[in-house]
Amino acid sequence: MKPALFLAALLLTKLVIAQDDARFSSGVITVYHHVATDTPPSTSISPQDFRAHLNYLQENDFNVMSLTDMVEVLREGQEVPDKSLAITFDDGYISIYETAFPMLQEFGMPFTLFVSTEPVNNRQPGYMTWAEIREMSDAGVTIANHMVTHPHMLERAARESREQWLARLEAELLAAEATITEETGQSHRYLAYPYGEYDPAIKALLKEQDFTGFAQNSGALGWHSDFLELPRYPLASIYANLETARTKMESLAFNVTQLEPASPVTTDASPRVTLQFDTNRFDIGHLNCFANSQPITMTWEDRSAGIVTLEPQMEFNTRRWRYICTARANNSSRYFWHSVQWINTSFPE
């Protein structure tokens, strides 16, 4: 091949890889809790709606893969098939065993259960037993860590020092992992943060213990994601609606870095945040950010470098909230999606 033609082919190959990179390095993780109609609405999806989700995934050629496969493939910088999705459940509620598990077996779809061990150990009403969890484990379900007591990990006990607080969390994390291993033989060192709450110190603890962390802030994950706070889409209550859920299921991962602040924990009712987006992956003119469905003021610090500061004009008086940024993918009806998590611990649960 002539040098000029070789160079042109090389440039074309790089262009195709750059275009494909945005799509094929993306995965989505969904999270459910109750699959029932007689449980708290904020964490519940009806069996009818859950079946509709599974039907949509099957009929629209999604690659529903195990969480372990998705995480390890993306961590290694490898490609996952387009429209790859992993299904997870938190806590260990009985409806997961009685309703969701048979449905997922019917559809042949793998899933992960993040279990808090104390309610199961205590045979707390509304939770599975270890025999039921072992049955799921034997059927190929991934069983992972959701702490012992499902604590608010950011909360310190009275007169508890920082060192004592972190030591307590470490002990509980490792105790839950040991129980799961003893009961099921599984140990993936995956933690789903209870309530989706964490901060840099908790992330550092997970890193020291070689754990992967899973949050509840929405968005797709990719090669460049922070594997100590991987996003998951909660699909309960109003978010169980298939019309909105399918947009999330089909979403793509930004390559985005939060420049400041470093922590999601804040006492500010209207915190600002500075993000840097890799603008090679999408048309920067398509980027929009929202809070409570209202547009957030976006100030470009360096547009060519993709650095933007978000300054909402509203105040938030809840314990947890998010800013959401999306951008339509070029020549597609799909969206890149990223959310910024905020936690104000001065508000009760």
Image: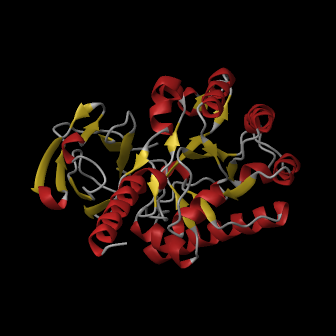
**Up-down: is 333 above or below 153?**
above
In the image, 43 versus 286, the foreground residue is 286
**Up-down: is 204 above or below 37?**
below
- Residue at horizontal 13 percent and vertical 59 percent from the top: 304
The colour scheme of the drawn protein is secondary structure
Q: In this view, does 250 lie to the left or right of 99?
A: left
- Residue at horizontal 62 percent and vertical 45 percent from the top: 63
x and y percentages locating residue 224 in the rendered image: 41, 64
Quadrant where the N terminus is found in the figure: bottom left
Q: In this view, does 324 lie to the left or right of 80?
A: left
Q: In this view, does 260 lie to the left or right of 130?
A: left
Q: Can residue 205 be seen in this view?
A: yes
x and y percentages locating residue 289 in the rendered image: 25, 41
Q: In which quarter of the image is residue 278?
A: bottom left
Q: Can residue 161 be seen in this view?
A: no
x and y percentages locating residue 37 in the rendered image: 66, 22
